[in-house]
Amino acid sequence: MTHAIPVVDVFAGCGGLGEGFNALERGGKYPFDVRLSIEKDVAPIQTLRLRAFYHQFRGTRVPDGYYEYVCGKIDRDELFRRHPVEAGEAKRRCLQVELGSAQAHDGLVSSAIRQATANSDDWVLIGGPPCQAYSTIGRARNSNRPVDDYNPDTDVRFELYREYIRIIATHWPAAFVMENVRGLLSASRKDQSIFDRMYSDLAAPARALSLDGISVPHSYGYKLYPVAVKPSRSDGLPTPSDFVVKSENYGIPQARHRVVILGVRDDVLARPKTLTALPEKVDAEKVLDGVPSVRSGLSSQDNPMNWVQSINDIVEQGWWFDIDASVRGRIDAALSEIEVPQCDRGDMRFLNSGSTCEYRRDWFEDERLQGTLNHQARTHRADDLWRYIYAACYVNGLDRPFRISDFPPGLRPNHRSTESALNNSNFADRFSVVPKDAPSRTVVSHIRKDGHYYIHYDPSQCRSLTVREAARLQTFPDNYFFEGSRTDQYGQVGNAVPPLLSYQIAELVAELLERNGQPDS
């Protein structure tokens, strides 16, 4: 390939999937160029445009202004004023529109794709429709709603994947990568398997559109491949479970299991290879230990002294002497180590104390970034601080996840969901500690609501993960800045595809297209 292959990223979020394609380097060249990212929400679009600006300088020196902006020394307008050409290109490459809306169907999206791909036959489509409707957790929550409040048969999110089909059948990329949650395999609508329908539609997009009364002037079929394993059936066809990628097998410090479908246009003659599993999994501590320590905030009367006192108040609670002596001893030891960190609560933009990373420093670290971005701890209630330090000490040496039933009765949350969590397995792990010596649980968008699922393993910090720590588990480079409120930032990180996994998928696609027309070895 002598020129970079255009890539279009739809339902792009903050750009995790696109980052892997943009970052791929082979023989000193970049095979892919994400020319267009489509996203509907404001904060992710701002993040995408800043990252598109950053990538305008790949292969050359990123300007000092970028680092001045992310550390808060100049504003965004000043950064873009200094570099108007790159800023204009970044804005053009990030289209804010809701796929499926009338605006999207009014020629806006098709025109943008034609411009981005220059009507080339060889381009790549990436992205996945919003996954809440397919998520097993989301379906569990929805099932608890009144029947007249939620009906999967009328949930429009189930149909958003057809916008993906529409783009394929209109513009015919040489390959596409669709990612979604594992719950897609068990989701159904109107008594029909969503995955089976999606598989059929992706394999024959023109036929799928014809069922909606839409005709296309010409059509291709697509061969659908898993990216992690070879098809397991004796006839060479994949089973649904073949499409599940277990990210922790590929150097991601997180047990994130997702469905990934690689579609290859039927005139592309090469067959893709599969990801290479690594011999060892990456423990969470290998990416979190080098992030500066910060303290959580207090929901009321927050200051460093009150924070320390509130945590130490755990020994004054009526249930303190009812807990297991070994756990009480570990909490006592943690209390003796609690002090206000040098960085205090951190900062949403920048800290003077920089991060290091034990794992893949070449990927995460940037020597020009003299600090840590998006690293400010949440505020918590005092009783949640007790729960966090208790859980972090309780799991020390435990060979199973922490459960809400592990709290002493007096420490259990006074919430209507607590009783149901005690009586059945739904959300029994509502409070969960990130393990030091294993990959983290999946980072999901729920992290934007509270941090109970992501308690830091260090009891002396007594808090949930920051945005940057969640981004480390998701393998975003440290110089990747997330725009918007802290809640926005958490949501962007939780919804993303790990860029380091995307990088490996991009390698498969690049290698596939390089071999197009050559006999398979």
Image (cartoon, rainbow, N blue to C red):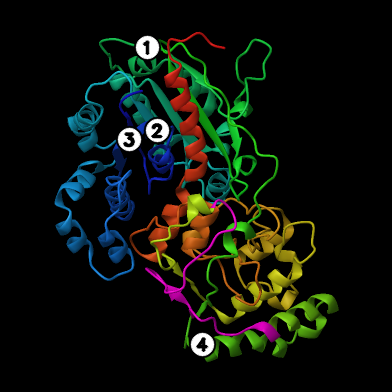
* CA neighbours of label 3 inside 10 A, class few (<14), some (14 to 19), many (20+): many
Q: Is residue 449 left or right of residue 31?
A: right
Q: Give the mark nearer the N terminus: 1 vs 2.
A: 2
Q: Main secondary structure of the magenta part?
A: loop
| Residue at point 39%, 40% (across, down) | 18
Q: Which residue is mark 3?
A: 33
Q: CA distance from mark 2 to mark 4?
A: 46 Å
Q: Give the mark nearer the N terminus: 4 vs 1.
A: 1
| Residue at point 52%, 16% (across, down) | 271
User: Is the residue under label 3 in contact with that under label 1 (CB below 8 Å)?
Assistant: no
Which amino acid is tagged 4?
A: Pro
Q: Give the mark nearer the N terminus: 3 vs 2.
A: 3
Question: Circle 2 sits in a helix, a strand or a loop, which is it?
Answer: strand
Residue 374 highlighted magenta (yes or no):
no
Q: Which residue is mark 2?
A: 126
Residue span colored magenta: 336-360
**Which mark's residue is nearer the viewer, 3 or 4?**
3
**Which mark's residue is nearer the viewer, 1 or 3?**
3
Q: Give the mark nearer the N terminus: 1 vs 3.
A: 3
Residue 163 location, quadrant: top left
Question: Circle 4 sits in a helix, a strand or a loop, which is it?
Answer: helix
Q: Position of residue 106 (x, y in %)?
A: 18, 31
Q: Which residue is mark 4?
A: 304
Which amino acid is tagged 3?
A: Asp
Q: Give the mark nearer the N terminus: 2 vs 4.
A: 2
Q: Identify the disc placed on residue 220.
A: 1
Q: Position of residue 391 (x, y in %)?
A: 70, 70
